[in-house]
Image (tube, helix red, strand yellow):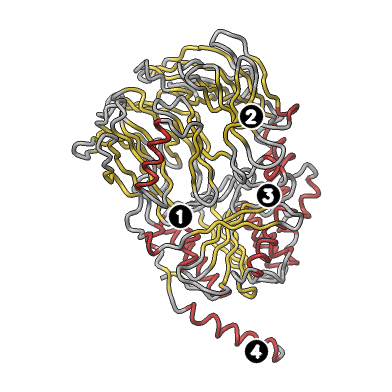
Amino acid sequence: MGWGTRSAGILLGCLLAPLAQAQVDLEPFLKQDVLETLKISPTGEYYALTVPLEDQTILAVQRRSDRQITAKISAGADSIIDDVWWVSDDRVVVSVAKKYGSRDQPYATGELYATNVDGSVRRQIFGRYGLDGNDPLPRAAELVDPMPDDPRKVLISMYALDTSMPNTRLMTLDAYNGKLDTVATAPIRRADFVVDATGQVRFALGAGEDNASKLYHRATSDAPWTLINDENTTQRVEVPWGFAPDGRTAYLQVEQREGPDAIVVLDTVTGERTQVLRDAVVDPYRIIRAPGGRTPVGSFFMHERLRTAFFDETSETARLYRKLERSFPGHSVLITSGTRDGRLKVVHIWNDTSPGDFYLFNTETNAADLIFSRRSWLDPATLAPSESVALKARDGLPLHGYLTRPRGSRGPLPLVVMPHGGPIGIFDRWEIDDEAQMLARAGYAVLRLNFRGSGNYGRAHMQAGAREWGGAMQDDLTDATRWAIEQKIADPQRICLYGASYGGYAALMGVAKEPALYRCAAGYVGVYDLELMHRQKSRHAKWLGNYMDDWVGDERAALADISPTSLATKIRVPVFLAAGGKDEIAPQAHTERMEKALKAAGVPVEALYVRTEGHGFYAEENRRAYYNRLLGFLSRHLGGAAAK
């Protein structure tokens, strides 16, 4: 070793030593939230709330008067309560999703359960193989409308999970005994339905095996369906939000050729379209509805923070939101539910340093009383805020993301670039991010970039990520890293890439393409062999194979050129890998192949395998072990704090 190399190492050790003395307490970030969602019953007597446990999320019904839990619904390990509806004063219906690991994106199973508030008549009301489990073909249901005028029934869409049923069926479902009655058949497979203010189904949105979106409309529940948008023809997706009370005026979210989506008013009689809301940077994020849940009145937009915009700022709902926003400055505000008489509202507030609190707001007295805090043990005053950042990629594409820096920090810092998973259509948000907070406490700046392919920035931004695994999507992360150096945010000698799922792929691909830019890389439940991924995904369904062709690539032999397993010899920095033995999204074989390739190339590599975990670790002891290893790895190479 020459003197120059040794002196640089001594100098770097001196720079890292002060940071390494501190330690990060993991416990606040490992504890489960008290609850996730909360909705009040129509009479105001009960709350329906979803409660996360270690490997599942359950529904609990709580009586307001004495806070006693009166009913529960659990669908077993790896299940979550996907959504909750009060279908009468004393009956709750829930939909179920599966999530095989903390980093998995939940997918709806199509199962529905229901219970009375006292725990009686608790049962599954829709099953994949029928209520008795004897139906030969699997099927799934989605709740379309809770039918508030009929306390016994709900409106659902039902579709088979194989190719034998050409279209989705619209049905009523008895919320007590599971009896089904067909109402109509959709004109397209995999259809979602939208009702008007009277509960009539007027829109159907779906796609065939080519994954091209098609939107149909009908004037009444007895009229024929008419195709009003075909993505193959218009090169845009149009998503129906609902109708104004007149039954003629409809609201659509419409993709644009450039820039973010717009909200458009459609006159369903004349066909005339008028744009009513559009943000300059981001897509509509979430619909805001009037009491009753059928009529859209505005939208959330997620950018520098979550903001609201309304079609009519003088409407009752707009005025209520503005009042609540003044009462909770600096917070996002969402009304989750309300009583039938409109007197009581459940309000969820949160921001980038608060996991969120639920309040009961009395519209007559303007009093807001705290119901639950999701994580009261986290003090917002000690957490690091996230600031919105903007830059341009090398080809001029605008890029946006979030930067989280340790409180009170100044000057260039060690940086962790943390690409999100997905990648297509997924995006980082202005909200508390546990890993960003954990890393900020360890002394790192954290950059979360919504590279091309991410959602929330319009069709063109997302389409720009097609077949760009290892290409322009990766270049965006490189450009953002260099931007952080130029802006004096990052110490150029102390930068690491870290991500999960696709983020793990991007971390390894980044150090293969730019070996001089980063000091280390960490991949958590990542995919590293794209030919293996394509083969595994494509065998499940034709539409999924088409999706892989469209977004990853259709020349499987060429996928090796953009697979980190094939590029291990280009990697020059230490790597940390972690995987779960039960992972079906990014099977452990990806990590094993990556580790083997790195060892063969002489690259320092550490690996953690947990046989009982899936796509992200659930068990607290396993998450503790993982973050201990991750923070220790980063501390050795960037100089931040290790875990206690």
In the rendered image, the vertical position of residue 367 relative to residue 496, given as above or below: above
First of labels 3, 4 by sequence position: 4
Q: Report crowding for label 3: few under 14, some 14 to 19, many 20 or more residues within 10 A (C-alpha).
A: many
Q: Percent x, y for residue 504?
A: 62, 57
First of labels 4, 1 by sequence position: 4
- SS at mark 1 in the image: loop
- The label on residue 188 is none
Q: Percent x, y for residue 72?
A: 31, 35
- The label on residue 452 is 3
User: Is residue 449 found left or right of 385 in the rendered image?
Assistant: right
- SS at mark 2 in the image: strand
- The label on residue 352 is 1
Q: Percent x, y for residue 57?
A: 40, 42
Q: CA distance from mark 3 to mark 4?
A: 40 Å
Q: Point out the frontmost of discs 4 and 1.
A: 1
- The label on residue 238 is 2
Identified by mark 3, the residue type is: Arg
- The label on residue 7 is 4
Identified by mark 1, the residue type is: Asp
At x 72%, y 35%, the residue is 546
Which residue ends up furthest to the front in the rendered image? Answer: 314
- Looking at the rendering, which quadrant does residue 116 occupy? top left
Identified by mark 2, the residue type is: Glu
Q: CA distance from mark 2 to mark 3?
A: 21 Å
Q: Determine contact: label 3, label 1, CB under 8 Å.
A: no
Identified by mark 4, the residue type is: Ser
Q: Point out the frontmost of discs 4 and 2.
A: 2
